[in-house]
Image: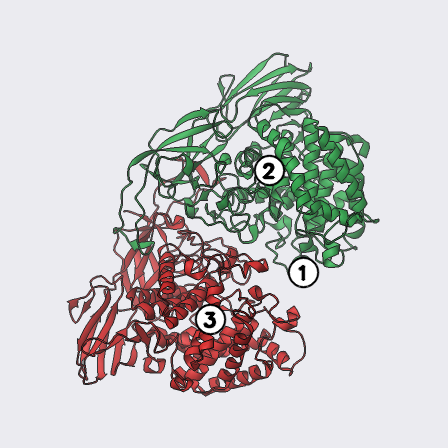
Chain colours: A red, B green
Amino acid sequence: MTATARTGVLAGPAAPTDSASVRLRPVPPGDARITGGLWHQRAEANRGASIPSGLTHLRAAGNVRNLEIAAGTAAGEPEGPVFADSDVHKWLEAAAWEYGRSGEAELLTSQLELTELLARAQAEDGYLNSVVPHREGQRYRDLPWSHEHYCAGHLIQAAVAQARATGRRELLDVAIKVADHLVATFGPGRAEDVDGHPVIEMALVELYRETGTDAYLELARWFVDARGRGIIAGHGHAPTYFSDRVPVRDATTVEGHAVRAVYLAAGATDVAVETGDRELLAALEHQYDAMERAKQYLTGGLGARWEGESFGDPFELPTDRAYAETCAAIGGVQWAWRMLLATGEARYADQIERMLYNGFLAGVSLSGTEYFYVNPLQLRSDAHPEGDRSPAHGRRGWFDCACCPPNIMRTLSSLSGYVATTGTDSSPDGASSVQLHQYVPGTVAAGGLELDVATNYPWQGRIEVTVRRAPDTPVALSLRVPAWAEGATLDGETVRPGYATLTRTWQAGETMRLDLPMRPRLTTADHRVDAVRGCVAIERGPLVYAFEGADQPDGVVVDDMLLDVTGEITEEHRPDLLGGVTVLRARGYRGTPPPQAATPYAEAGTRPSGHGEPVALTAVPYHVWANRGPNPMRVWVPAVGD
Amino acid sequence: MTATARTGVLAGPAAPTDSASVRLRPVPPGDARITGGLWHQRAEANRGASIPSGLTHLRAAGNVRNLEIAAGTAAGEPEGPVFADSDVHKWLEAAAWEYGRSGEAELLTSQLELTELLARAQAEDGYLNSVVPHREGQRYRDLPWSHEHYCAGHLIQAAVAQARATGRRELLDVAIKVADHLVATFGPGRAEDVDGHPVIEMALVELYRETGTDAYLELARWFVDARGRGIIAGHGHAPTYFSDRVPVRDATTVEGHAVRAVYLAAGATDVAVETGDRELLAALEHQYDAMERAKQYLTGGLGARWEGESFGDPFELPTDRAYAETCAAIGGVQWAWRMLLATGEARYADQIERMLYNGFLAGVSLSGTEYFYVNPLQLRSDAHPEGDRSPAHGRRGWFDCACCPPNIMRTLSSLSGYVATTGTDSSPDGASSVQLHQYVPGTVAAGGLELDVATNYPWQGRIEVTVRRAPDTPVALSLRVPAWAEGATLDGETVRPGYATLTRTWQAGETMRLDLPMRPRLTTADHRVDAVRGCVAIERGPLVYAFEGADQPDGVVVDDMLLDVTGEITEEHRPDLLGGVTVLRARGYRGTPPPQAATPYAEAGTRPSGHGEPVALTAVPYHVWANRGPNPMRVWVPAVGD
């Protein structure tokens, strides 16, 4: 395919080429719009607060100045971490998608200013990095740690976003020079080296999709295949941390640094579908299974360990020390999205929903100005804050390592890209197909259909899809029924989890009504998850709930309380609370007052027992916790009455 | 007091001066001897295997060569971590105590050779470090991280040990030059800087005790008081990690890096007793209480987090990711010992016993040649080893950061120092007093008494103390009754936990018989300890037990099994097994086979339930686990039948 073929095409989170081995194809985000509800509210905070304040932070922290130094328009030494450029690039990507979403003129102006700066900072041969050559004395001296390809990858992603969302090619020109430089420098027979932090793989494939230049795809494939062959470990680095212990296609699970692992897997999925590599895709499916089976939090959060920001062993999922980095949830969504396109399986759309509504969304305050880097499922009463990533002091305005905030921004500004797809299978009768994966109030134009979606999801389970325009030919319209939605009905008929599909020649004005049962669900965990053995969590629809100290009756200590699983759970929508949330109330007990013992250990039977006074406990969606200052919180509560 | 007053006095783990505010005073280890049993067996492995192979490792890893470079007798760059010297110093301390214990000539020869090397490596002004000046370009550039005082501290401790155990003063001369250099360089009005890793505080106080030079005590006091005042944080380091967030006397708990924290607390206790600082001692008692109440594992292990090798929040005590560094248990023993001397309270001797028999002793293999750096209370079936500290691959012969092995060596060689004390209170009738804290087969000469102790402790609970010689005056002889030993009897009379004291004018040939009930005990934990909620552990006497995969019936998976708390626990002494251990057998269940589910989460009531087939489970002492290769292990098992 030629570059021209895709110029100006809006497509958010990964857009496979026509020749890719995928079952589903994205709907360009201009054609899927979110016009109200929870995500619109968050996207507006992103536009109005996060993105503008993000640029202020990037200026204050020196990231922009670093580029000015590289461009020769400022003097001094670069500041911040070695990957400081990538935060600017992610911000640029956010600004691009957000300009495409809201058309806010200032977002184009800022983008073009920064783009010009990047062009000036770029070396003649295409190399572009404002920190590493200053600090290391030369390029690519310690690629496993220098993040040079990582920065290049985020630049490329920003450039593709700018081209697709604004139609401007200035940043794409910079990115193509970067990519050509990489192609000329790395690969078999050239420098056989890989970056310790993946993202370049996804980026190069997307640039291939944008430009049609095969060399980008080939280099991405080489980077994927180069891992696990001792290149990184050869630099004296720990192979597991860098997803470098075994080759990607031999790996049976995810391990090491969680963001690195899922970015790599997402990029490998891109490579697999563009090269038709079924063996690689099968390996990635197996790895995804292993992650979901034993290494993912109920919130969708990924990464059990602070040590190395990494995945733990299977079922090692502590709640208090869950790392669950916001960026890992974002990478998880990116990987799941690619698996969804590749396989067409609803489980990946379920996963996207779980990660977006919980593990991801908790990463930003309702105001859009404060962020969590780390997203535990429990905050103890006596938790002591350590460093700027600690959840114990609540969200923070920025971080020394500021990867998460601009990553949140680019995700919130491109969310409409995850709403719908069209199918690539041509059915015998030639019907096109459209899939709705995520339910948001808005519009979708796909497969010849124009649809209005009306819903109060995730607060209510009714989704009304009205056909505004339809072609003369049949269209198979599939609505995702989440795995948790046993008892769902479509136009009154019971439908099973997966996709409920109606194939017909649609008429304008026709309406379908999907009803998802939103009853609160009590969830338990595998007995191997130590931290929550004997506990329950409450979910409702796609939302995981949390008990925050702020909502409990006087004197109830979150660390001590118990939940009565035989009690009814009642719900109340509170438009006034936390931006409007449905609150749940459950029967519980205060718990035994903690013994004032000299040690936590006592002979069985000698400890005071009993459940303490009955109390009404209140839960709010996990994603809004810590919007009233830091206070004790837990998702999982010891169960009684079972 | 004068230097002469203490020359040649053998005293192992801290010997307060006569003017110190202590309730108890150590018995010089030459006067308390361990002649058989578990600790003798381990001390012999230490002498025969650990100490000689330790020197081989130190030579192979470059630690000795670093000193040769500093001495000008070898060329090249120093290798290993910045604190490499300290491992040599700890080995020297071990060799000194071990020479005192066993009299093995080779240990004196090696000591004197290394001592000569250290003397040659020492600068004219007393500074002695083989790594830092090479690497940093100059001294004391980054004291919070450079470990220069830390290395000096271990050198001083080795020198005091050499003087006390061998009577040789060569290393003491080197150490005095080091200490005089520190006194000339640091303190108020001089360089106001502190080392990030405590130990110099303990060391300087002990050198003051050895030499009578007040300036050493004054500098130690200054180092203790300098913490928490922004000196370390001022270098850009995280204050909590370095025990530098608040002044020692204002701290209400232990936090940050566990070894740093307990070494500092031990040194501060030394300062408190030597300066009569009751306020400081009270603060330390409060901190010890807080540690024992909520930050210590059942094994006595200290440090819940891999991240920063640090204490966690209260009750944050995961079993799989327990860090419980071997060195932290050693530091815990050192602190508890000083608290015991200061207060005379049996609880600290109980603590020493718990830490020595469990959290400490698990750090070395029965062979004495392999070590654990990290001592978790659970190893999962699918645990993946990462780096040389990972318990998943079993103990290791040495470590890149080799602090633990020589720390184990110096502890095993000086253990007799913890056995007994004499009291400092003169009773109205002028009776002297002797306390037996730890029960080992051996001899004790103290307070004019000469005692033989015969026991098979910790396998059997009978301890027979026979008087061999006695003065004509009354002696109050106290035997510790551990807190777990409810129902203990002394000569047939029930005695309460604490110290059981008999005061009389003793006759040679008299025998006392203490019987400690060794029935297996089921232990539960505070409900706030997530990882073990609903679980029980088994203890017997001072030993914590563990279930290792190797001992369970075919097909029983340690991760899945359950323990029936209504069943009888039977015991069998197995002289053939693991150096001779008492094995426990408990009734249990295989557990529900783990569901092959897509996720660890399921709606309550939908998961397969039941306990599975009844099985007999076998537990061995925690300290001998992983002597048959790494295999799944857990101390805490989910309880049923309660």
Q: Which subunit holds the residue at mark 1?
A: B
* Residue A620 numbered mark, or none: none
Q: Is residue B506 left or right of residue A395?
A: right
Alpha carbons under labels 2 and 3: distance apart: 55 Å
Of mark 1 and mark 2, the one earlier in the sequence is: 1
Task: Tell me the crowding category of disc 1: few under 14, some 14 to 19, or many 20 or more residues within 10 angstroms, Cα based.
Answer: some
> Callout 3: helix, strand or loop?
helix
The amino acid beneath tag 1 is: His
How far is the residue under mark 1 from the one under mark 2?
31 Å
Whether residue B39 sits left or right of residue A440 in the image: it is: right
Write down the residue under mark 3: A220
Viewer-nearest residue: B27 or A626: B27
Q: Residues within 10 Å of mark 3 (few under 14, many from 20)?
A: many
Q: Residue at x 67, y 28 (%)?
A: B101
* Image position, residue A310 (x, y; %): 48, 58
Q: Quadrant of residue A465?
A: bottom left
Mark 1 sits on what residue? B235
Q: Which mark is residue B333?
A: 2
Q: Are marks 2 and 3 on the same chain?
A: no
Give the answer, above or below, for where A413 lies relative to B203: below
